[in-house]
Image (tube, rainbow, N blue to C red):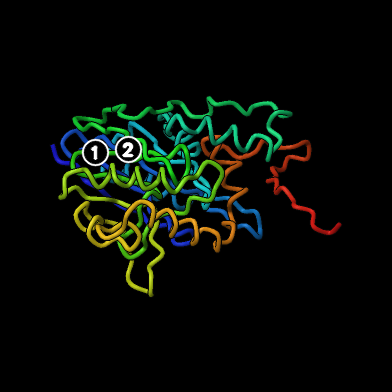
């Protein structure tokens, strides 16, 4: 059995999505796909996800699972769109329950119908496995960036979501509700305890200093050279560094649109009486 990894880069959000396939039996999974969204016009389209569907068809691959590593705050998930086109089940970590509970008041979910914890078809626990063809995917809980963050281990590959970036990019922020720098340190330690040759595939690359796009490293390289969590940095030092850095970061511009969609497995808000869909942005009134 040979596992093949194909990365798809979404330039507008710096996101890398993956199609991982079992080349022997021609089955596949999609990890962290993206809907195209223009914040200024409100236009939502499926150009990126359609490229992935075309790739599956061109390579005669059967899609078995649609997965997200967490409820992303910087892009809209294409999970529901892909499900609507293929009928394939959507999956995320069971920690999504805690994320939705934290944001229920923000989005006034208690007063609306249709907001439940069953938007995804399957909620994965730590250590749970899924089959696709002759390949096995094992979920590994890696909270810290968000409380629902999962990494996916397939053969000698680990798809870490936002838990780690490329070594020169460091690690993800922890200042969202439910984020915790200490937990992220522990989660990264779990990743770094995997065999040294395992390939780490990241969900974002922001190309520090203008270098070329990179989205794959190894456990050994990450452990030795990550600018935030290398062998010379201890947990207390990392937590202080992460918290200090997070205090300077702006709110992601797609935070509220992303969460409204991603907490519902990528479903867009329901149409209102005029036939249009709307996003909500909670306001902080500082005029008084």
Q: Quadrant of the C terminus?
A: bottom right
Q: Hey, which quadrant is residue 112 in on the image?
A: top right
Front in this rendered view, residue 256 or 9: 256
Front in this rendered view, residue 233 or 49: 233
Does residue 106 appear in the picture of this structure?
yes
Instruction: Tell me which residue sits at (31%, 39%) in the image.
Output: 152
Instruction: Tell me which residue sits at (32%, 54%) in the image.
Output: 234
Nearer to us of marks 2 and 1 is 1
Around disc 1, counting alpha carbons within 10 Å, would you say few (fewer than 14), some (14 to 19), or many (20 or more)? many
Does residue 49 appear in the picture of this structure?
no
- Identify the residue at the far front of this view: 236
- Identify the residue at the far left of this view: 1
Q: Which mark is residue 29?
A: 2
SS state under label 1: strand
Q: Would you place residue 92 above or below residue 238 in this image?
A: above
- Identify the residue at the far bottom of this view: 209
Instruction: Tell me which residue sits at (31%, 53%) in the image.
Output: 7
Tell me: 135 left or right of 103: left
Q: Are marks 2 and 1 in contact (CB under 8 Å)?
A: yes
Task: Give the residue pinned by disc 1.
Answer: 154
Q: Would you place residue 217 above or below residue 130 in this image?
A: below
Tell me: 187 left or right of 121: left
């Amino acid at each position: 059995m040979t596992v093949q990894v194909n990365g798809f880069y979404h330039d507008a959000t710096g996101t890398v999505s993956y199609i991982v396939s079992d080349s022997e039996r021609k089955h596949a999974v999609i990890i962290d796909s993206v809907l195209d969204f223009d914040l200024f016009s409100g236009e939502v389209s499926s150009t990126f996800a359609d490229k992935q569907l075309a790739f599956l068809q061109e390579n005669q691959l059967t899609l078995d699972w649609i997965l997200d590593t967490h409820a992303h705050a910087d892009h809209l998930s294409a999970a529901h769109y892909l499900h609507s086109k293929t009928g394939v089940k959507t999956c995320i970590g069971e920690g999504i329950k805690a994320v939705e509970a934290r944001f229920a008041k923000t989005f006034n979910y208690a007063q609306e119908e249709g907001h439940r914890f069953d938007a995804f078809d399957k909620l994965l626990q730590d250590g749970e496995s899924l089959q696709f063809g002759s390949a096995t995917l094992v979920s590994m809980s890696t909270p810290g960036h968000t409380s629902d963050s999962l990494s996916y281990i397939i053969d000698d590959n680990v798809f870490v979501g936002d838990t780690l970036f490329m070594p020169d990019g460091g690690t993800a922020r922890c200042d969202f509700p439910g984020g915790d720098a200490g937990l992220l340190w522990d989660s990264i330690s779990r990743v770094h305890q995997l065999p040294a040759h395992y390939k780490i595939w990241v969900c974002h690359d922001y190309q520090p200093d203008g270098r070329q796009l990179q989205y794959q490293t190894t456990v050994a390289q990450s452990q030795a050279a990550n600018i935030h969590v290398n062998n010379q940095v201890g947990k207390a030092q990392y937590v202080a560094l992460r918290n200090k850095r997070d205090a300077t970061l702006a709110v992601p511009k797609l935070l509220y649109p992303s969460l409204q969609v991603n907490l519902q497995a990528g479903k867009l808000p329901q149409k209102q009486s005029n036939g249009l869909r709307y996003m909500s942005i909670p306001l902080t009134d500082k005029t008084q």
